[in-house]
Structure formats: structure tokens, C-alpha cells
Image: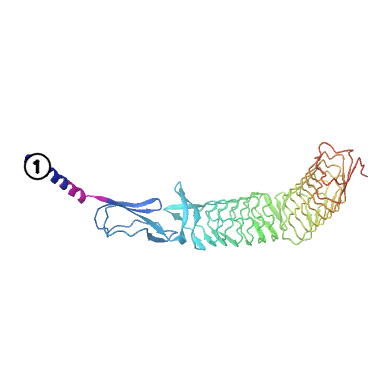
């Protein structure tokens, strides 16, 4: 009997303990935004949830759509996790590093986007690399004060038409607006702090017609406005100290480049860009409609692509006393209206592709006592109308493809001073007859220097 009583007591104690445990059982209700826990609270199973306090949501720049499920009336006997849902039209992908936000992508459907100054309580400081690249929806973007950088390729090949830039922006990355062919306007805030524009930043932004560069700009990268064919004029501020090679190549409608008088690095004369000392001619605007231009006597170098892609200029002259030494890479490349040029005796070097594609060029002459030493690779390639050119006896080097495709050239004399002659130097020059002072091919001439096996008169003394 005592044993039975003990068993009954144990059972009653277990039931009592279980009842006590059930009365105090709790489960967790959690609110989340992505991977972030907004609020997590324990509730007794069965407890009414009608007075639950919702967590604070940072909705700036986003539209809250609701929670992923309905909040139950009472706490069930399971944990409940609810996720914030945002309207798809305002989705912004971003990352937080060192308590600062970089915008990574906009995935929404609104063509006009005002980017918030903060996300998740942290300041937005950067538009990340390729954030809007290939975006075919967004046309107008307003950046908030606080953004310091626009990353590489940020708006490349996008449909953006207008960008509003805050005072805080310091840099525009490489290729940031390359191929953004709908971009017509970039508005910089008053007293903009912009310091740098990267390589090819606005390359092929063909609809951009006017751009007022901020007064604190320090550097413009190589090819920054290449093929920005809508640009008609551009003004360089006084603070500018660095301009990369050929930033305006292919800007076919550019008629004037002006420079602030306070600039100590660059200057402009009649719309043509020079360094401050006027020793390097940096760019003759491709949209100018003059047929003749005289290079000032102070110039010692014609810069890369300085006269490239010109469609009107037929004659380039050099002022009396000219001391030009170097004709830069591509200096007259595709200057399709240029018909003749007389190079002063001071010229030492004709750069790679210097006259390549100058299809109307018929005559190149050199001043007596020419000091020319180098005719570099492709220097006269595809000068299909060239009929007259006498290589000065001072020349030592002719690069590969130097006269490739010069099909109208009928004769050319090679002096004994030429110790290096590149591969396929006369490829496609199908009418040419060559005379050479040396009795046979020197060791420094490439074995394929004359690929068409055009006639060569060896041991010829040029009168």
C-alpha cells in the first residue's frame, strides 16, 4: 500500500511540474530588415500580441511595403520571425564599411532617383563601381550632400540624362559616364569641391553639349572627353594642373577651349590649348572651321592627337624661327582635310601614327638641313594620296608599317644613314620604286621590310 501511494505521489508531482512549466513557456517574436535584427522580444505562449510595439524603421530613400507575414493575435507555441518588405521600385543595394555607406546598385523602376543622405542610419559617401552600369531605367539622379566619390564605370552605358552633383563630391572615376549617350547635363553645386575627373570619364558621352567644370578641379584624366561629339566649348578652371593625353580627341564639334587667366599651367590662344609657356601645343579644337593655321614659334612639341580628326583644316604652317622638335603620337591622325605640310629643320621625331589616315595629304616637305632622325611606326600609314616625300639624309630609323597603304607614292630614296627599317614598312605601297644608297640590305633592316618585293635600286647615289 505504501508503494502504491509513493507511485501516485510521483505522478502527481510530475503533472504539477508540467502544468507549472506550460504556464511559463515563452517563444520569441523577431522583426528583421534583411540580415539586421530590428527587434527581438520573448512572449509567453498564448499571450495576446495586440499591443506589440513595432520596431523603428529607417525608410529614407525606401518605401515600406509591410511585413512578410501577419502578426498573430496571440503568441503561438513556436518562434515567429517577420521580415520587412520594401516596394521593389525603390530597392537600393548598399554596403556599410567603417560606418559609411557605398551605394552598390539601384534595382528599382523609377526613372528619377533622389539618393538619400543616409541609409540604415549611416551617411552615404560613395557611388560604387558600376553601380548604375547598363541601367536602362534611371534618367535623372540627384546625389546627396556627403557623397565624395563616383566610382569607376558607375554610370557607364546607362540611360542617365541629368546628374545633379553635390558640393561634397571630390572625384569622378575612370569611365564613370563612358558610353552614356543620353547624358545631356551635369549640374555641379555652387562652390563644388570636385578635384579629379578620371580616365575616359565622359568618353562617348555624345549628347553632352555643355559642361562647366568646377573652379577647384585639379586633374583631368587621359581621354576624359574622347568622342564627346556634342561638346562645343569647354572652359578650364584656374586650379587645373594636370591634363592627361588627348582628353578631347574625337570631340568633333568642339570649337573652343578657354582657360582661366589665373591658371599657372595652361593657356589658350584663339581657342587653341597650350601649356603655360606655349612650348607644347596640346589641342587644336576639332570643330574649328579655319582652313589654315600657323603654329607659334615658341612651340617645341606638337602633342598627342593635337590636330587629329580635323575635317576642315587643309594647311598647317610653322612660324618663322620655329623650333618644333617633336611631332607627337597621332598628332595629325585622321586629319582628313590636310593636303600638305612643310616641316621645319628643327623636327627630330615624327611620332607613331602621326599622319596615319590623313587621306587627303599629298605632299610632305622638309626644310633644308633637316635634323629629322626618327620616322616611327605607322607614321604615314594609309596616307593614300601621298605622292611627294623625300626622306631627309639625317634619318636613322623608319618604323614598321611606316608607309603602309601609301599606294600613290611612286618613289622613295633611302639614304645610307638608315640603320633600322621596320617590318612591312611599305606594305600596300604597290606603286613604289625604292632607291637605296647601300649596296644590300643592312643587318638592322627587318627581313620583311619590303613585303611586296617592290623594285629596289641598290647602291644608288641620290642627287
- The vertical placement of 456 against 208, above or below, is above
Q: Tell which of 9 and 318 is nearer to you.
A: 9
Single out the residue that lies furthest toward the left.
Answer: 1
Q: Residue at x 75, y 60 (%)?
A: 311
Q: Position of residue 347 (x, y in %)?
A: 80, 46
Q: Residue at x 64, y 60 (%)?
A: 206
Residue underneath mark 1: 4
Q: Range of the magenta residues?
A: 16-26
Q: Position of residue 120 (x, y in %)?
A: 42, 53
Q: Residues within 10 Å of mark 1 (few under 14, many from 20)?
A: few
| Left/right of residue 28 with respect to residue 203 in the rendered view | left
Q: Is residue 446 magenta?
A: no
| Left/right of residue 371 with respect to residue 275 in the rendered view | right
Q: Position of residue 23 (x, y in %)?
A: 20, 51
Q: Tag 1, which secondary structure? A: helix
Q: Tell which of 409 and 149 is nearer to you.
A: 409
**Rendering colour mode:** rainbow
Magenta segment, principal secondary structure? Answer: helix
The image quadrant where one finds the N terminus is top left
The image quadrant where one finds the C terminus is top right
Amino acid at each position: 500500500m505504501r508503494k502504491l501511494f509513493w507511485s501516485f505521489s510521483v505522478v502527481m508531482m510530475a503533472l504539477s511540474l508540467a502544468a507549472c512549466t506550460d504556464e511559463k513557456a515563452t517563444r520569441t517574436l523577431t522583426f528583421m530588415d534583411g540580415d539586421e535584427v530590428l527587434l527581438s522580444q520573448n512572449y509567453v505562449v498564448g499571450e495576446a500580441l495586440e499591443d506589440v510595439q513595432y520596431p523603428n524603421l529607417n525608410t529614407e530613400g525606401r518605401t515600406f511595403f509591410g511585413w512578410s507575414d501577419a502578426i498573430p493575435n496571440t503568441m503561438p507555441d513556436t518562434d515567429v520571425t517577420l521580415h520587412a518588405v520594401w516596394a521593389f521600385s525603390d530597392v537600393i543595394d548598399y554596403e556599410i564599411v567603417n560606418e559609411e555607406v557605398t551605394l552598390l546598385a539601384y534595382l528599382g523602376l523609377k526613372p528619377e532617383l533622389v539618393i538619400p543622405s543616409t541609409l540604415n542610419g549611416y551617411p552615404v559617401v560613395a557611388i560604387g563601381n558600376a553601380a548604375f552600369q547598363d541601367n536602362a531605367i534611371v534618367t535623372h539622379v540627384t546625389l546627396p550632400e556627403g557623397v565624395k566619390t563616383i566610382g569607376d564605370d558607375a554610370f557607364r552605358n546607362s540611360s542617365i540624362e541629368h546628374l545633379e552633383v553635390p558640393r561634397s563630391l571630390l572625384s569622378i572615376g575612370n569611365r564613370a559616364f563612358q558610353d552614356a549617350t543620353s547624358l545631356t547635363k551635369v549640374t555641379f553645386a555652387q562652390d563644388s569641391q570636385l578635384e579629379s575627373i578620371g580616365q575616359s570619364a565622359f568618353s562617348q558621352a555624345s549628347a553632352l553639349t555643355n559642361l562647366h567644370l568646377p573652379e577647384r578641379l585639379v586633374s583631368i584624366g587621359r581621354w576624359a572627353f574622347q568622342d564627346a561629339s556634342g561638346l562645343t566649348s569647354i572652359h578650364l578652371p584656374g586650379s587645373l594642373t594636370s591634363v592627361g593625353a588627348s582628353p578631347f580627341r574625337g570631340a568633333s564639334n568642339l570649337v573652343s577651349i578657354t582657360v582661366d587667366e589665373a591658371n599657372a599651367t595652361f593657356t589658350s590662344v584663339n581657342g587653341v590649348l597650350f601649356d603655360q609657356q606655349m612650348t607644347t601645343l596640346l589641342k587644336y579644337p576639332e570643330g574649328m572651321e579655319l582652313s589654315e593655321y600657323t603654329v607659334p614659334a615658341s612651340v617645341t612639341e606638337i602633342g598627342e592627337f593635337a590636330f587629329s580628326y580635323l575635317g576642315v583644316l587643309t594647311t598647317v604652317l610653322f612660324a618663322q624661327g620655329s623650333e618644333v622638335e617633336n611631332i607627337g603620337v597621332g598628332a595629325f591622325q585622321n586629319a582628313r582635310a590636310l593636303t600638305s605640310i612643310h616641316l621645319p629643320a628643327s623636327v627630330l621625331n615624327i611620332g607613331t601614327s602621326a599622319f596615319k589616315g590623313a587621306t587627303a595629304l599629298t605632299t610632305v616637305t622638309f626644310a633644308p638641313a633637316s635634323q629629322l632622325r626618327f620616322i616611327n611606326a605607322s607614321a604615314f600609314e594609309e596616307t593614300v594620296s601621298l605622292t611627294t616625300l623625300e626622306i631627309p639624309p639625317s634619318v636613322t630609323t623608319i618604323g614598321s608599317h611606316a608607309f603602309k597603304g601609301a599606294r600613290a607614292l611612286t618613289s622613295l630614296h633611302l639614304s645610307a644613314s638608315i640603320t633600322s627599317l621596320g617590318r612591312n614598312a611599305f606594305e600596300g605601297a604597290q606603286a613604289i620604286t625604292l632607291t637605296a644608297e647601300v649596296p644590300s640590305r643592312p643587318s638592322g633592316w627587318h627581313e620583311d621590310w619590303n613585303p611586296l618585293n617592290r623594285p629596289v635600286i641598290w647602291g644608288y647615289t641620290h642627287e
